[in-house]
Amino acid sequence: METLQWGDVSRRQLNWIAIAAASGERMEQVVTEGAGSAGEGRLKLLKTLPGLAISAFFLWWTFRGLHREDFRNIHLAEPMWVAGIVGFTLLGYTTRSFRWWMMLRSVRSRFVVCARVFLTSLAANNILPLRIGDVMRIFTYAEDLGTTPSIVLSTVILEKFLDVFTLAALFVITMHTGRVVSPHLRLAAKLGLGISTAGLLILVFGAQTLQPLIQRTFAGTKNAVLAKLEHWLVLALDCIRQIGVAGSLLLVVISFIAWGFEGMMYVSASRLLGLSTDWAGPWQAVSQANLSFLIPSSPGGLGTFDLACKDALQRHGVTDAAALAFSLLIHGWLLVVLTGVGGIWFLVHRLHRARRKPLVEELETLPAELP
């Protein structure tokens, strides 16, 4: 084989060699990045598999033992109650949007913006895994609300405590009617009520005390992560402190009103299907079904919501098939309405603001976990 001498290589050949070398480096970079993206995609998929498995198990448990013949006698007994379902759904989620607006009054956020962001986050939670809607509310839409992610985070935490407190209190009240609640479920309800009560008391009455304590704890730190954590905690506690004790008590009242409207939606659905149950059946269903969202599962609470709702109604004399039909009606209605309204509002806002950045790219910029 002949040895290639430097003098045998023309300038044009040198150019082609340089282009080939650069292309090789670029190709290697693309392959490496592609492999990394594929690896990240597989990791994200693996994270969703446990939730899907949990939902599949609960769906199997919900439908087991039932046959097509069991649903023959189920029909719309009083169609006029459709108006009740629609009206109380509107009142319930308007009140919950109002409650969140009350939490953000210190930053002068507009009610319409708060309602849009709130319903968009609910829609995202119904179709995306890992409660990504709440994360989007904190990071993606903080600028729209005219505030910082830390303040939005504090309101989301307060909102969750208020919801668990209200629903747990409602369940504790209704669990003394109908068939006896299992000791494990009774303990879980009381535990949830106790934890949410303690959390609310700490947030409401302890914010002013905790704020200087945290500042002293992190004083003099040179670690950037710890400094950022201190900044987030101080801003969050300051937001809760500005709400005040009177404002927090008002939020508790608004929470009971909001979930009262949702309970009336369940009552309307039970009248629509002509269910034979006592007064507490629909109210225990609304508390137990919504508390089931605390169980990790697929987006929208598939399986967990349906089984919890069905179990609550069975405890109050409703047959298996009728209880399942009720749970599917309520769950389907909420999924379609909340996802539809939140999704339409999301698209209209993006078109109005002429945002060209795809949603997938926005989701990629979100942090993997909360700081």
Image (cartoon, helix red, strand yellow):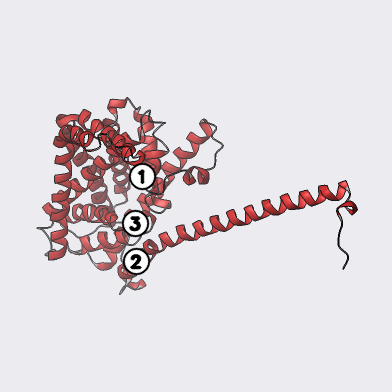
Query: Which of labels 1 and 2 is toward the front?
Result: 1
Residue 218: image x %, image y %? 25, 37
Q: In front: 85, or 344?
A: 344
Image quadrant for the N terminus?
Answer: bottom right
Residue 371: image x %, image y %? 34, 44
Element assignment for label 3: helix
**Kind of residue at disc 1:** Asp
Name, please, the residue furthest toward the left: 176
In the picture of the structure, the residue carrying the numbered disc 2 is 59
User: Marks 1 and 3: in contact by CB < 8 Å?
Assistant: no
Q: What is the spatial separation of the Cα atoms under label 1 and label 2, in whole angstroms?
A: 25 Å
In the picture of the structure, the residue carrying the numbered disc 3 is 301
Query: Which of labels 3 and 1 is toward the front?
Result: 1
Q: Residue at x 41, y 31 (%)?
A: 143
Residue 27: image x %, image y %? 68, 54
Q: Earlier in the sequence, mark 3 or mark 1?
A: 1
Element assignment for label 1: helix
Residue 317: image x %, image y %? 18, 64
Q: Quadrant of residue 90?
A: top left
- Crowding around mark 1 (Cα neighbors within 10 Å: few <14, some 14 to 19, many 20+) is many
